[in-house]
Image (cartoon, rainbow, N blue to C red):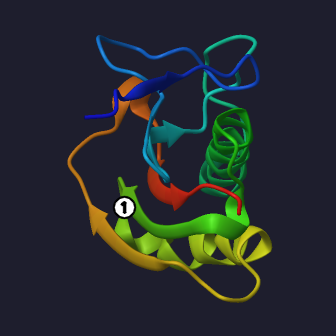
Amino acid sequence: MPEKEVVVSQKAPKALGPYSVAIRFHHLVFCAGQSGLDPETNELVPGGIEAETRQALTNIKNVLEASGSSLRCVMKTTVFLRDMAEFSKMNRVYAEFFTDNYPARSTVQVAAIPKGGAVEIEAIACLES
């Protein structure tokens, strides 16, 4: 049975706990949730939900690239929002990153996100062929 491979990216924030930012297994990449943390400071970017969504998706893009995948290969995302009233703002930024052949997506409101963030996004992707 093949081993799972831990993915490391210098362009994404380090894990905040005992987990990996992504795992590569066979032809799949499972990305842990990324919030709007700046990879250099490990602090939330200023600017609210739009800026945090943009940074979270940039972090996912960088993790996927480190794994041999890309945003084009994302099959499923899950978006966790602190406030569902900000869905349309998040969705506008999300549409900048996924412009066609959209991945499946679930969006849920949660009680809290680490470091007081407004959004966290996780993704499952396949490897580039």
Residue 98 horizontal side relative to residue 108, left or right: right
Q: Is residue 43 above or below residue 124?
A: above
Name the kind of residue labelled 1 in the image.
Asp
Residue 2: x and y, percent?
A: 33, 33
Q: Residue at x 43, y 47 (%)?
A: 26
Q: Is residue 117 above or below residue 110?
A: above
Q: Is residue 19 above or below residue 127?
A: above
Residue 112 horizontal side relative to residue 72, left or right: left
Q: Is residue 96 above or below residue 6?
A: below
Residue 88 horizontal side relative to residue 122, left or right: right
All told, the count of numbered labels is 1
Residue 14: x and y, percent?
A: 55, 14
Q: Residue at x 61, y 28 (%)?
A: 37
Secondary structure under badge 1? loop
Quadrant position of the N terminus in the picture: top left
Quadrant position of the C terminus in the picture: bottom right
Q: Which residue is mark 1?
A: 83
Disc 1: CA contacts within 10 A as few (<14), some (14-19) or many (>=20): some
93 and 86: which one is in front?
A: 93
